[in-house]
Image: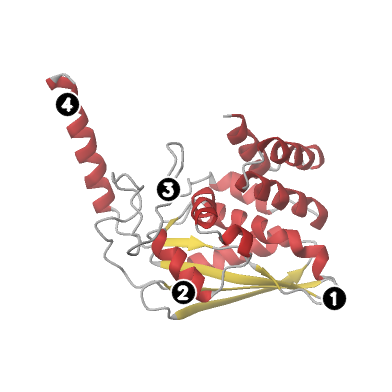
Amino acid sequence: MSPARLFAATLLFSAASLAAQADRRPVVVVFTFDNNSIGDKADYEGLTTGIQDLLITDLASSSKFRVVDRSRIAEVLREQDFIKAGQVDGASAVRIGHLLGAQYAITGGFMTDKSGNALLTSRTIDIETSQIANPEKITGKADDVLGMIAQLSVKLTQDIRLAPRQPSNTGIGDATGNGGLRLPTGAPNPARPPNSETYAKEVSGTIVEKTMKTKLDAPTMKLYSRALDEMDAKNNPKAAELLRQVINKYPDFEPAQRNLAKLGN
C-alpha cells in the first residue's frame, strides 16, 4: 500500500474509532416475543419474529439507544444453536446479549383470547446484573398487531430508563476480526460476515408511521414472519416467495419491500 493510501486508511479508521467512542448510547438487543395465546395459540405461532422485526425497526429511530440489527441477532443465535432450540429465556438472553455486546435486552410476550382480545408485554433485562425492569403492557385487538407494536414502541421510547454502561474495548462495531463480539473463554466465535450490519438502520419516521398504521391481518403477518424465518435459515428463494405474497396483498408494506430488496442484493 502506498504511503498516501496508508495515511488515508489510518485517518478513516481513526475517524471511525472516534465516532464509536463518542456514541455512548446503551446498546439494546430485542429478542423474539413468546406466544402465550389461549385456545388458538397455533393461529399466532408465526407472529413472534415479525413482532421483533417491526419493533426493532421502530426503536431504531430513537436517539436514546442503539438497537442491534435483527439479522445480526439471527447470525449469533444460529452459531449458538438457538435457532433449533426455540425461544430465548432470561438466562439465554443474558448470554446472547453478552455475545452481541449489548448492555440491555428487551423481551416480551404476545397473548390473545377466543374473543379476539390481545395483550402485548415487554421488559428489559440488564445484561450485566440480570436485573429486570421497565415493564410495559399494551392491550388491544388481535387484528391490529401493528398498532399495538407502535404503542409499545412509543411507551418504551418515552418511559424506558437505562443506566449508562461503559462500552467494552471489544464491543460490537469495532475493527476486530470477530466483529467486536465479547466472547466468553472457550466460546465459539460467531464471526460477522462482510455484509452484516451491526446496528439497525434508522428508517424515516414517515415510513414507520405509515407502516404501523397498516391494518395487516394475522394471516399476512404470519406470512411476513415466516419470510423472516426463511431469511434467517438462508432459504432466500422461499423467503422471497413469501415476501412477494405479502406485497401482493399489501403493496405499500415497506418492511416487506425492504427485505425483498435486501435479498436481491
- Residue bearing mark 1: 39
- Residue bearing mark 3: 198
Crowd tier of the residue under label 4, counting other residues whose Cα lies within 10 Å: few below 14, some 14–19, many 20 or above? few
For badge 3, the amino acid type reads Thr
Q: Do residues under tags 3 and 4 come within 8 Å of each other at their CB atoms?
A: no
Q: Alpha-carbon distance for marks 4 and 2? A: 43 Å
How far from the left and from the top, in percent, is residue 169?
A: 24, 57
Relative to 190, 109 lies left or right: right
Report the disc number at residue 6.
Answer: 4
Q: Alpha-carbon distance for marks 2 and 1? A: 29 Å
Labels 2 and 1: the sequence-earlier one: 1
Q: Alpha-carbon distance for marks 3 and 2? A: 20 Å
Labels 3 and 4: the sequence-earlier one: 4
Relative to 154, 247 lies left or right: right
- Residue bearing mark 2: 125
At x 31%, y 44%, the residue is: 177
At x 60%, y 71%, the residue is: 108
Relative to 90, 33 lies left or right: right
Give the secondary structure at mark 3. Answer: loop
Q: Alpha-carbon distance for marks 1 and 3? A: 38 Å
